[in-house]
Amino acid sequence: MTYQNYKKTLSEQYQKSREKRGAKMKQELQESFLLEYGFCKKENFYYYKSFLSDSSFILAVYYDTQRKELEVKVYDSFLKEEYFPFYIKNYSGHFLATLHEEVDHILEDIIQKCSMKKEKIRKILEFAQKKYGSIPNYPWKGDPNYCTLTNSKKKWYALLMKVSPKAIGLEGKQKIYLLNLKHSPEKIPNLIDTDRVFPAYHMNKKHWITVNLSSDISWNAIEELIQESYDLVNS
């Protein structure tokens, strides 16, 4: 088989399997965070390029702001063209496995640092500081994944966490943001929907709830729940 025929065969397999490989994915990313990460903007797209640990390959990540779609491409830096084996599902081996693992790690980092869900965290911290004068505390030294908000008497009214979705019974490997808040015991049963609001993770389920910040819960709902928690802790 000539190189051109080999390339054509790979291209055909690539076209059939690329979507299955997850080369494109729906994601809501914050444009300001993309720029901070190192993305460049061109019309309705943001793009990021970087050599992988094996400098023979370049990772290119594109974000379409209209379609809210993230696209991944891997290029052979010597041939100046896409590296088709990366996308093909039935291609395996240690080298490709290592390549996939590195790309997945970078993608996870981009999603975690540029996600709209991170914007919710920023808004929560700003809201708490402006309204209650609360400054985030990190009670477990060396672990930035847990942050508490306290009133003037140093009593917790909120706990922000970044944990595995399995912590609240959800599927997935990518960590999610949760917010624990105090709530009236008689209201909690009607509030739990196991989508946006869950029984409290790692706290008294009679008096606390866990809000899934990775869900589509509205900012108004979050604000109201924080206010109620703050009032209960102060009462």
Image: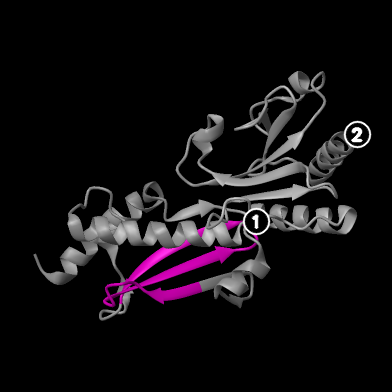
Is residue 36 shown left or right of residue 197? left
> Where is the C terminus found, in terms of image quarters?
top right
Q: Residue at x 77, y 33 (%)?
A: 182
Alpha carbons under labels 1 and 2: distance apart: 31 Å
**Rendered residue at 67%/69% (across/down):** 32
Residue 114 versus residue 54 in the image, above or below: above
Please tell me how crowded label 1 is: few (under 14), some (14-19), or many (20+) other residues with Cα within 10 Å: many
Q: Nearer the viewer, residue 74 or 66?
A: 74
Q: Label 1's element?
A: helix
Which of the colour schemes (rainbow, by chain, secondary structure, one colour) is used?
A: one colour
Q: Is residue 25 left or right of residue 43?
A: left
Quadrant of the rendering where the N terminus is positioned: bottom left
Question: Which mark identifies residue 59?
Answer: none
Specify start and end residues of the magenta stretch as a single range: 48-76
Q: Which residue is nearer to you in this view: 100 or 230?
A: 230
Amino acid identity at mark 1: Lys
From the viewer's side, name the closer residue of 35 and 11. 35
Q: Give the left or right position of residue 4, taking residue 230 as reference.
A: left
Q: Residue at x 42, y 56 (%)?
A: 23
Q: From the viewer's perspective, is the residue at label 1 or at label 2 nearer?
A: 2
Q: Of the residues shown, which amino acid type is indicated by label 2? A: Ser
Quarter of the rendering containing residue 12: bottom left
Q: Which residue is mark 1?
A: 118
Whole-percent x, y for residue 210 in the image? 67, 34
Q: Residue furthest left?
A: 1
Q: Position of residue 209 (x, y in %)?
A: 71, 31
Q: Position of residue 189 (x, y in %)?
A: 74, 19
User: At 81% from the left edge and 55% from the top edge, which residue is drawn?
Assistant: 134
Residue 111, located in which quarter of the rendered image?
A: bottom right
Q: Earlier in the sequence, mark 1 or mark 2?
A: 1
Residue at the disc numbered 2: 235
Type of secondary structure dominating the magenta stretch: strand
